[in-house]
Every structure is written in structure tokens, then in C-alpha cells.
Image: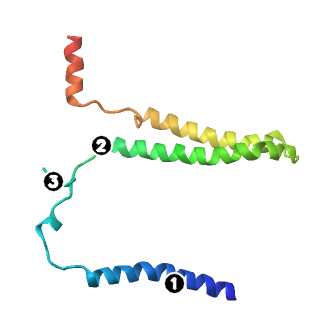
Amino acid sequence: MNQWIAIGALGLVGVGIPIGMMVVSALLRPTVTEQGKTVIYESGEVPTGTAHVQFNIQYYMVALLFVVFDVETVLIFPWTLIYRSALENGATLTETLVPMLVFIGVLVVGLVWAWRNGAVEWVKSPRASRRKTERQS
């Protein structure tokens, strides 16, 4: 029971410190509204345009693909370290290799799907496509 008390106390401290810091900063900070507080910060420069910019969905697709393949490497590297020791401890080649091949197969299927749906192809700007058609003429 003493271990649970320690865990609860740690949880209370972990939640209490950030909340306490926010309360203290809310009490101590100046409440004078300045024009600079409502302006979007752009490295000290005067902003142009609005803050709401639509990004191309392909940026997010590339980011998701990066995360997926980053997780792949996080899972494959430890597997390569325990592969030999698993074989030495009596595991069969099928027991050690098939799960990783299935995992890599699922990733390859996902990559092929993303490739066929155009997730890894960049959209050309209108200016670049005009230049291409002018060169072909």
C-alpha cells in the first residue's frame, strides 16, 4: 500500500507544480494590453497578410509517411539486435523471421498504396507547368 501512496504523491506533485506555476504567473504578470500582444509574431517583422494560410495536404501526407517509416526503424533495429540471440536460444528461423517479414510486407503495401494515390508526388506550381509547356512548344 505504501508504493501506491508514493505514486499518488508523485502524481499530485507532477500535476501541482505546473498548475502552481500557471497560477503564480497569472498573478504576477502585467495585465496591460499592448498592441504588440495582438500582432502575430514574425521574427520582429511587420506581418503581411493573414495568419490563416492553407497548406497543401501533401505536406501532411509526407509527414505521416515519415512517422510511419520512422516507427518502422524504431522497431526493426531492436529486432536485429535480438535476432541472433533468439536463434542461439533455440528459436527457429520461421519463428524469428516471419513476424518481421509480415511487418515489412504491411509497410510495403502501405507505401505502394500511398504511391499509387499520389501521396509522394509533389504538385507542380502553375508557373512551373507553364514553363514546361512553353519548352515543349
Instruction: Write down the residue under mark 3.
Output: 50
The residue labelled by disc 2 is: 56
The numbered disc on residue 116 is: none
The residue nearer to you, when weighing 56 against 86, is: 86
Looking at the image, residue 126 lies above or below residue 57: above
Name the colour scheme.
rainbow
Which of pointers 3 and 2 indicates the residue nearer the eye? 3
The residue positioned 18% from the left and 80% from the top of the image is: 31
Residue 98 location, x and y as percent?
A: 73, 41
Q: Which residue is mark 1?
A: 12
Instruction: Give coordinates of residue 106: x percent, y percent.
Output: 60, 41
Secondary structure under the numbered disc 3 in the rendered image: loop
Secondary structure of the residue carrying tag 2 is loop
Q: Quadrant of residue 107?
A: top right
User: Does residue 60 appear left or right of residue 13 in this picture?
Assistant: left
- Three-letter amino acid code at the position of disc 1: Leu
Determine the CA span between mark 3 and mark 2: 17 Å
In the visual, does 52 lie left or right of 107? left
Q: Residue at position x 81%, y 39% from top?
A: 93
Most extreme residue toward the right is 90
Kind of residue indicated by mark 2: Asn
Q: Nearer the viewer, residue 123 or 80?
A: 80
Residue shown at the point (56%, 37%) measured from the top left? 109
Which of pointers 1 and 3 lies earlier in the amino acid sequence?
A: 1
Pointer 3 or 2: first along the chain = 3
Mark whose residue sits in front, 1 or 2: 1
